[in-house]
Amino acid sequence: MLLDMKHWKHVFKLDPDRELSDEQLDRLCVSGTDAIMVGGSSGVTFENTVDLLARIRRYEVPCVLEVSNLEAIVPGFDLFFIPIVLNARDPQWIVGHHHQALREYGAILDWQLVRTEGYIMMNGQSTAARITEADTALDAKDVEAYVRLADRLFHCPVVYIEYSGTFGDMELVARCKELVREARLFYGGGIDSPDKARKAAQSAHTIVVGNAVYERFEQALATVQAVQSN
Amino acid sequence: MLLDMKHWKHVFKLDPDRELSDEQLDRLCVSGTDAIMVGGSSGVTFENTVDLLARIRRYEVPCVLEVSNLEAIVPGFDLFFIPIVLNARDPQWIVGHHHQALREYGAILDWQLVRTEGYIMMNGQSTAARITEADTALDAKDVEAYVRLADRLFHCPVVYIEYSGTFGDMELVARCKELVREARLFYGGGIDSPDKARKAAQSAHTIVVGNAVYERFEQALATVQAVQSN
């Protein structure tokens, strides 16, 4: 069965390097979220990724690996998301790691399971922006140009506007959603309450709730209902 | 009318910064080549591009602009090829210039006419490789990984192996042709005789004859017949 992302409104992003109790994981997996995305900016290893996958696999929820580390490509996920960081200054994060991965696994990869994400890093203070040396001094026209580039030049099925821990400019996100023709617009950053989830879901196709899971668990859990009941 | 590149076997690449007599241009345009591609690594301006386009437009041959310079985007071509230099060390040649162009023209562009080319620069001595700071220390597995990346991750309709002025490794090119699923494999470099054209055409889907037009005109012209009579 191939997953259809077209109906995804809500995704939890879980970090293999951070702790969740079995009870918390259970509540997330049966929450009604459309998918669990596994990924993180640092400390992701094969071991902690395979461990988290095994725990999520007890549930029916679709489970996606966002690949950020060649050493941590674990088989058995429903989809593999490959980030292309469009505003990275270091080309390793645009094509370099991808090239290295394809050099190793290109011949054996099941391409049906691979999806590119055209990432736009918006928060220069975030770990991800620092690692990728992202140019975050972007005005609205810059962001819109990256959205078009990801959608129409690179044919990314996911265009991902990532504010990492801060709540973004929802007017800009909404304009970007109008620009994409084939891609689905993902928004992530600062969604730590049902109210913010609702606002973000009005602007993006799919919202991603990450940090809040670890910092404000009950609020994070309540974002599902806020979005899915719309 | 939209052009179908699927049947292209032979292309002449003409440099707006180099000279051709009217008689030479006439013979190229009625030669039976599948298309004329206009582009160059240096000295390309709006003026010399529009001038060359006007001269080619008197003929029926399809005419494509390979965009290498934002200042030289001239309307009126049948297609616009956008190079993505996969092995560039300078990210400007992977996404930067593209982003800048979309910032300016993204809203008014006719996307039906745009095609990406996933470029692999093979000759470190060439002007193009020096400008893009290409990493040309590639073994066969590296090249194959870039081919897969262009074809399957970036969905480039053209994957272009460019040996710029030297005749490449035809066994490697032939293997790369077998790897692409959706793209057409273009080969360019060192085709300055009918014999080399024939060999290259056995390995790639489409061969590009460039420098030879300016250096060995009659031999360059004879490459068309060598390929099209196969």
Image (cartoon, coloured by chain):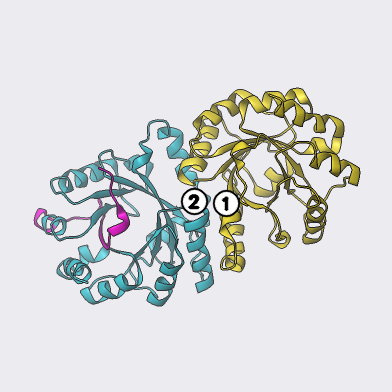
Chain colours: A yellow, B cyan
Residue A105: x percent and y percent? Answer: 61, 66
Give the amino acid at mark 2.
Ile
User: In terms of secondary structure, where does tag 1 sit?
Assistant: loop
A1 with respect to B206 (left or right) = right
Q: For residue A102: magenta?
A: no
Please state the horizontal and vertical placement of residue A196, each as a whole percent of the image.
73, 25
Neighbor class of circle 2 (other Cα within 10 Å; few <14, some 14-19, many 20+) is many
Q: Nearer the viewer, residue B178 or B220?
A: B178
Confirm whether the magenta stretch covers residue B15: yes
The residue carrying mark 2 is B94
Q: Quadrant of residue A228?
A: top right
Q: Secondary structure at mark 2?
A: loop
Name the residue at 17% across, 45% down: B57
Along the horizontal axis of the image, is A122 left or right of B47? right
Q: Position of residue A150 (x, y in %)?
A: 52, 42
Residue topped by disc 1? A94
Across the whole image, how many numbered discs are drawn on residues? Answer: 2
User: Whole-Å distance between the Cαs marked 2 and 1?
Assistant: 8 Å
Identify which residue is drawn at 32% across, 41% down. Answer: B73
Quadrant position of residue A46: bottom right
Evaluate whether residue A81 shows in this view.
yes
The magenta stretch is B1-24
Residue type (three-letter) at the residue carrying disc 1: Ile
Can I make out residue B88 in this image? no
Chain to which the residue tagged by mark 1 belongs:
A
- Between residue B55 and residue B78, name the one nearer to us: B78
* Quadrant for the C terminus of chain A in the image: top right
Vertical placement of B189 versus A224: above or below?
Answer: below
**Chain assignment, label 2:** B
